[in-house]
Image (cartoon, helix red, strand yellow):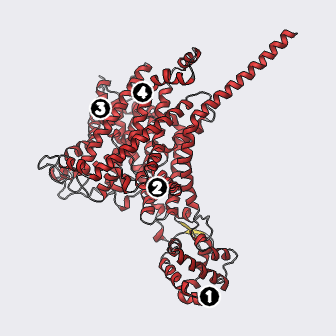
Amino acid sequence: MKLPSYATPIEKFAYYATLAFTGLVLLFLISPILAIMPLSFNSEPYFSYPMPGLSLRWYEDFFSNERWMNAVKVSLLAAVLVTILSTILGTVAALGLARANLPFKPVILGVLISPMIVPVIITAVGIYLFYAQIGLIASIPGLVLAHTVLATPFVVVTVTSTLSGFDHSLSRAAAGLGATPFRVFTAIMLPIISPGVISGALFAFVTSFDELVVALFITSAEQRTLPKQMFAGIREQISPTITAAASILIVFSVALLVGIELLRRRTERLRGH
Amino acid sequence: MAHAEAVIHNARQLKFQLRTAERRGKLRALALVAPLFLFIVVSFVIPIVLMLKNAIYDPDISNNLPRTTSLLAAWDGSALPSEEVYAALAEDFRESEKAKTSALIGKRMNYEMSGIRSKIITSARKIKALTAAPYKDQIIAIDPIWSDLNVWTTIKRAGNPVTGFYLLNTVDLETKPDGHIGAVDPGRAVYLDILKRTMGISLIVTLATLVLGFPVAYVLANTPPRIANILMIFVLLPFWTSLLVRTTAWFVMLQDNGPINDLLLGSGLTSQPLPLIFSRFGTIVAMTHIQLPFTLLPIYSVMKTIPPTYMRAARSLGGGPVYSFLHVYLPQTLPGIGAGCLLTFILCLGYYITPALVGGPSDQMMSGIIAEAINRENNWGKACALGTVLLLATLTLYFVYNRLVGIDKVKLG
């Protein structure tokens, strides 16, 4: 951003004011993350600066406490299963959506991504009522199915957008050369759209791993997920271990999402944008 | 002749083949979509329909007082019911005492007549002991509520499992004993306020994200990509961390002895810690922080497409800086502003975790009240009715969003 040579004093003022304001807003955006990570190394159980000393005691508590470790295990297990289920369901559906001859496309698309739009508390209440009737409350399969509902729309959206850049004459060429539809998919299509599929899978993983509201409703203490344990950690006893858990989650989700961003850039480069 | 016929025949056959191929293509596309479609219908649409059903369907009274309600169906409500009805009530309470459902009846009646719960539970216990007719006078002697016409009309009305009671309640209305619909008494009229509060907080947060986001989007869109990419990390990093983690961060930041109050006390701006946690202000700050990227990014992507020459042209044609900005630049950003603000407003309506952790009791929004209705009161009818209202509001706005922006334009990150 450059100031034009014909700038009036008002413009000069507005220019510097905008820059300063932008700086403050960016600071506002990053401050909670910057503030909470150092506090996780505080040697005293307070949330204030300056810290009297550094220690890893909250991390030690996180990794040695059975409740936290159990929660990590449940969350990882659920997230992996959700990723597998929703990536398969979502990718196959995206292949159908990408076909020009799909009838009722707007209605179908609307239904498929509706879990992304409906406030999650409504989904949670509905799923609780449904699970209570079919006996899936407080079970891992119930948790996985519910999270798959929430995660699949992300796979559909990412894979569909990757497919929009896919040159369908490639698969027609393969089919013309005698490849079966399955072979066309595995040998031609999948390698090209794989960045979209992988980033969809990562989104699905993060969606399940971070999800709290549905887990609060349909799981019991045995299937306590990591977000649920954090929520309890804040509500019941304000333990500084939550700062360690939050810091670990920040690093974890940022690593995953940097992966998504790199994949997205790769797709764009391949498309020649 | 024979040749022409063969041509016609071939053309027909070709048409037929084409149609079959088209149909096969359609079926194939549908077959690919079908597994997920069925999955979403079974594990998402059915639960939502169940929620909607629970908002208008409550069989607690008709299931637990079956004899009484079926007799009351023919009762005209002008005078106390006959001995026959009282006998049926005694029989129903004997059953409900056995099945331990008297408390359920009391709870349901209490929704419509506050304070009646314990009277019904006590009555049920005493009525169980009655052995011989006539019941009417004995039951009235147990508790005078049984000689109150309003109690009987309420049982009659609640005895119909299909009820508008919960939905009317969400807008602070109720069916009066005489059958008219009117406002509930002011002490219980809280739900319109909650609806207004939810809309109000969402509106303030939306405006705050616009005011904070617009200049940042402008700078990001008009800086060389090398610097813009670095600045973008500041926007995307919080966007990528989970909502719960960011709420946790704000929960820590806003504490009385947390970093913000440290800073304020240290700089001498205040002499006492400000009550930031569990306040409306804290809720709005945390929500604004979480929603800012959602408003900012659509505005940014629209600004990227505005050629800088337009502003230069406006200036060279004699427009002042303010005039050019207002009449040339701003109108072109409106699609981005509309999309970003609408998305943020829709998402704000459904907020639960952030107000629950950072807000006080008077800062809870619709979702929080729904969760409370279930966790504290075990009142599913109320929760589902409020859910219906929230769903309706969200879907209406989403319909507008879809018209303006398009579902398929939803971008992630």
The amino acid on which the numbered mark 4 sits, given as a three-letter code, is Pro
> Counting other residues with Cα less than 10 Å from the Cα at mark 3, is it few (<14), some (14-19), or many (20 or more)?
some
The numbered mark, 2 or 4, whose residue comes first in the sequence reads 2
Q: SS for tag 2?
A: loop
Instruction: Identify which residue is drawn at 39% across, 22% down.
Output: B316
Residue drawn at (48%, 39%) of the image: A153
- Dot 1 crowding, Cα within 10 Å, few <14, some 14–19, many 20+: many
Q: Is residue A131 visible?
A: yes
Q: Position of residue B273 (x, y in %)?
A: 21, 57
**Which type of secondary structure does the marked residue at label 3 adopt?**
helix
Q: Looking at the picture, which amino acid does disc 3 mark?
A: Leu
Residue A14 lies, in percent from the top left, at 30, 34
The outermost residue toward the left is A52
Residue at the spot of label 1? B136
| Residue ID for mark 4 | A195
Q: CA distance from mark 2 to mark 1?
A: 45 Å
For residue A159, above or below residue B140? above
The residue marked by circle 2 belongs to what chain?
A: A
Element marked by disc 1: helix
Check the picture and name the quadrant holding the C terminus of chain A: top left
Q: Residues within 10 Å of mark 2 (few under 14, many from 20)?
A: many
Q: How far apart are labels 1 and 3 at the CA level?
A: 79 Å
Tell me the amino acid under the disc marked 1: Lys
